[in-house]
C-alpha cells in the first residue's frame, strides 16, 4: 500500500497542483474504473470510452496548476464524463446526419447524371 492511498481527494489535489506524479497516479487509479463504467453505459463503444477517459485525465493533468474546484474531485470528474459523453453523442449524431445527407444527395446526383447520359 502506498501512502497516497490513505490521502483524501483534497490532499491529492493539493499535491497534484505541485506537479506530484504519484498523486496524479493515485487519482487515476482511484477513478479510472468508475469513469469508464459510467461512459461505457452511455456510449457502448469500448475503444471510444477508453479514449474519453484518457482525455479526461490528460485534461486534468494539463489543468493541474490552475485547477480550482468548487465541489469535490468526484463531482468534477463525474461532470467531465457527463459533458464528454454528451459531446461525443452529439458528434455521432452530426456524423450520422451528414452521412444520410451525402448518401441521399449522392444518389440523386447519380440518377441525374445517368439520365443526362441516356
Image (cartoon, helix red, strand yellow):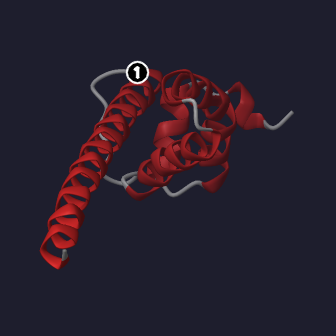
Residue at 69% across, 37% down: 29
- Residue designated by label 1: 75
Can you say whether 14 is above or below 86 in the image? below
Q: Nearer the viewer, residue 2 or 63?
A: 63
Where's the C terminus, which quadrant? bottom left
Element carrying mark 1? helix
Towards the viewer: 12 or 94: 94
On screen, residue 36 above or below 23: above
| Left/right of residue 86 with respect to residue 105 in the rendered view | right
Q: Residue furthest front?
A: 118
Q: Give the percent coordinates (x, y) of residue 43.
A: 50, 30
Q: Residue at x 36, y 26 (%)?
A: 79
Mark 1 residue crowding within 10 angstroms, few (<14) / some (14–19) / many (20+): few
Residue at position x 52%, y 29% in the image: 39
x and y percentages locating residue 105 in the rendered image: 18, 56
Label total for image: 1
Point out residue 102 in the picture as x, y percentages from the top left corner: 24, 56
Outermost residue, bottom side? 117
Q: Residue at x 32, y 43 (%)?
A: 96
Asked if 38 appears above or below 19 in the picture, the reply is above
Amino acid at each position: 500500500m502506498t501512502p497516497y492511498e490513505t490521502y483524501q481527494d483534497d490532499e491529492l489535489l493539493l499535491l497534484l497542483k505541485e506537479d506530484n506524479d504519484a498523486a496524479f497516479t493515485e487519482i487515476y487509479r482511484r477513478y479510472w474504473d468508475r469513469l469508464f463504467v459510467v461512459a461505457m453505459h452511455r456510449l457502448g463503444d469500448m475503444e471510444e470510452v477508453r479514449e474519453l477517459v484518457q482525455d479526461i485525465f490528460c485534461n486534468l493533468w494539463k489543468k493541474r496548476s490552475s485547477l480550482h474546484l468548487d465541489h469535490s474531485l468526484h463531482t468534477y470528474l463525474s461532470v467531465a464524463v457527463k459533458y464528454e459523453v454528451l459531446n461525443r453523442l452529439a458528434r455521432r449524431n452530426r456524423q450520422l446526419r451528414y452521412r444520410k445527407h451525402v448518401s441521399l444527395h449522392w444518389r440523386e446526383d447519380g440518377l441525374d447524371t445517368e439520365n443526362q447520359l441516356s
